[in-house]
Amino acid sequence: MSRPEHGGWAISDRDRRILVIGGTRGTGLLIARRLAAQGRTVRVLARDPARARPRVGNDLELVQGDITCRESLLPAIRGVGHIIFTAGCRSGRPARERTIRATEYEGVIHTLDVARQEGFSGRFLYMTATGVLTPSLMATLLNAFKGNTLRWRLRAEEEIRASGIEYSVIRAGVLVNRPGGRRRIEVTQGVTPMSPRFIARADVAEVFVAALDHPRAAGASFDVVWAARGGEGIGGGPPSWRELLMPLQADRCRVFFYGLFMDQDLLRAKGLAPRDAELASVEGLELRIGQRAALVPAPRSRVHGVVLSLRREELTSLYAEPGLSLYVPEPVRARLATGDIRAVQCYNLREAPAPTDRNPEYALKLRAVAERVGLPAEYIASIR
């Protein structure tokens, strides 16, 4: 099979520096080299640049940093246009859960936190594994061998989606060290169990390079594996990367609502289709009502609301309405009724109302909505 070409769409930011975290070995190194071969400016994070230099070569910029240490990431992330994250505990080796959590979950959180702090406005591409969403025998065995890696990677995906940063989540099949371009690649979205579906690291590197600039990969999570022998994959014939990724659909976004938009009927009246409603609360914040409702830091407080899932274009339309454009998405960790804590988005005002501001009419409406959706009575009574 001929290798898909990367042409077919405009690239307006080819000169922006790309940071590859995990780029000193394996798939990450292949991605970094492929990008450099295309003339892109590539920076690679390394815990020990001197030790990594012989593997990486002299053509790539190396910057010292460790994803388990948030402050060390500042020099690497400052000034970059895109971030590719392939770091994780070594394949084929057992690992303790605390190591998996520190690397594959907290490492992602540290990277996102620093990126937001630095005003990062590019795309964050994350490599993970197929099967994170669905229990299976193969997933159970991998989690037992490698410190619940799939559970922590799923949590990392949730942090990425809640971050407000443009992203692509690419779930690769079982990685093998074989030449790329020999087999058709199948791209799918949805809930699929982990299975012995393989793909060459070199092919995954090509997928990342293609997804970096592809408009349909923005906000999308998808699986990539080799197609079954004789299968056509997506596109039929030797597909271009544009054809291969064009069917992608953006993920739904889970949002914590604390105001009138907790009312699903109100959202439906606006033409939206909310789903997956769950009661939730967020600690360390309190509700403040002025001309508009907002959340403000309050260490001993807790705000209650509803988590709903909406399409990203629905959220864009909703918060483009008059007065609502002042709200911006930010990540919060919501405690669901099940007791689980999950990263979700929350829209909040850039500037909160003054403590003396009041809006009795809005508060009355909000108490009625809060009672209807089933928020705690004590909390409803506190809405003023």
Image: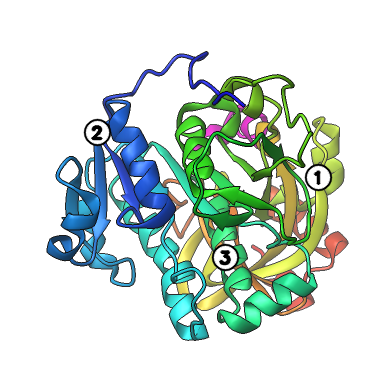
Please state the total of marks drawn on the protein image.
Answer: 3
- The residue nearer to you, when weighing 313 against 2, is 2
Earlier in the chain: of badge 2 and badge 3, it is: 2
| Position of 188 relative to 90 (above/below) | above
Q: Earlier in the sequence, mark 3 or mark 1?
A: 3
Three-letter amino acid code at disc 3?
Arg
Amino acid type, label 1? Pro
Vertical side of 345 occupied by 271: above or below: above
Give percent across and percent down for residue 260. Answer: 73, 49
Residue type at mark 2: give it. Thr
Circle 2 SS class: loop
> How packed is label 3: few (under 14 Cα within 10 Å), some, or many (20 or more)?
many
Residue under numbered circle 1: 274
Q: Residue at x 33, y 72 (%)?
A: 68
Is residue 320 covered in magenta? yes
Front position in the image: 124 or 188: 188
The part of the chain drawn in magenta is 315-327
- Residue visible at 24% across and 56% down in the picture: 55
The residue singled out by tag 2 in the image is 41
User: 97 or 36: nearer the eye?
Assistant: 36
Residue corresponding to mark 3: 153
Q: Is residue 208 left or right of residue 360?
A: left
Choose top left, top right, bottom left or bottom right for residue 355.
Answer: bottom left
Q: Whole-percent x and y of residue 148?
A: 60, 78
